[in-house]
Image (cartoon, rainbow, N blue to C red):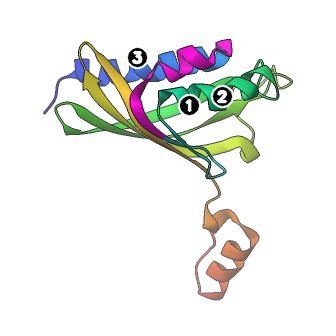
Amino acid sequence: MLNQSADAGVRRTLSRLGDAWGEGDPDRYAAVFTEDADYTAFDGTRMAGRRAIADGHRALFAGVMRGSRMTVREPRIRHVATDVAVVWALGGIIMRWQRGRTEPSAKRLSAVTFVLVHQGDDWLVTAFQNTRYRPWSRTVIGRLTSRMAGGDGR
């Protein structure tokens, strides 16, 4: 079993990611990723490499995402090798006009997956996937289907 310092390193990287987002700094945000990272946004947009990740966030941080905050709730860290970790969490963006919020709205909540690699003294993100969190069982159709099948829909 890996020691707790590996988990702490992964958590520090996630914290740096959130800090860079909150500062609206696309270069600092992208610096948390490996040079050849793969990044898939909630809408399916793929950015390949650190430069593309920075460029892809530049307009966002200057525009609609200016002043927003990123949250990552209770990350589940699984070490698949001594130098590779997979992280799954619920997270999202709190927009600048949502100042009193501490959690993202339901429409901005996402299930996110990070693959991090240990490089030197640091953990860097080498792959990221963001999928809007819309559990089938919570949709109208999902609840109706479950009831028709004899379940309670929860």
Q: Are marks 2 and 3 in contact (CB under 8 Å)?
A: no
Q: Position of residue 70 (x, y in %)?
A: 63, 26
Q: Looking at the image, is mark 2 or mark 3 earlier in the sequence?
A: 3
Query: Answer yes or no: do the residues labelled 3 and 1 have beta carbons within 8 Å?
Result: no
Residue 124, horizontal then vertical, whole percent? 37, 25
Q: Is residue 22 left or right of residue 88?
A: right
Q: Quadrant of residue 106?
A: top right
Label 2: few (<14), some (14–19) or many (≥20) C-alpha neighbours in 10 Å? many
Q: Which residue is mark 3?
A: 12
Q: Quadrant of the N terminus?
A: top left
Q: Earlier in the sequence, mark 3 or mark 1?
A: 3
Q: Which mark is residue 145?
A: none
Real-space Cα separation, disc 2 to disc 3, in angstroms: 21 Å
Residue drawn 42% across the image and 20% down it: 13
Residue type at the position of mark 1: Ile
**Amino acid of disc 2:** His
- 40 w.r.t. 75: above or below: below
Q: Which mark is residue 57?
A: 2
Locate residue 87: give its quadrant. Answer: top left
What is the span of residues highlighted in magenta in the rendered image? Answer: 23-38
Q: Nearer the viewer, residue 31 or 102?
A: 31
Tag on residue 53? 1
Tell me: residue 116, above or below residue 66: below
Badge 1 marks a residue whose secondary structure is helix
- Please tell me in which quadrant of the rendered image residue 19 appears: top right
Work out whether residue 35 can be spotted. yes
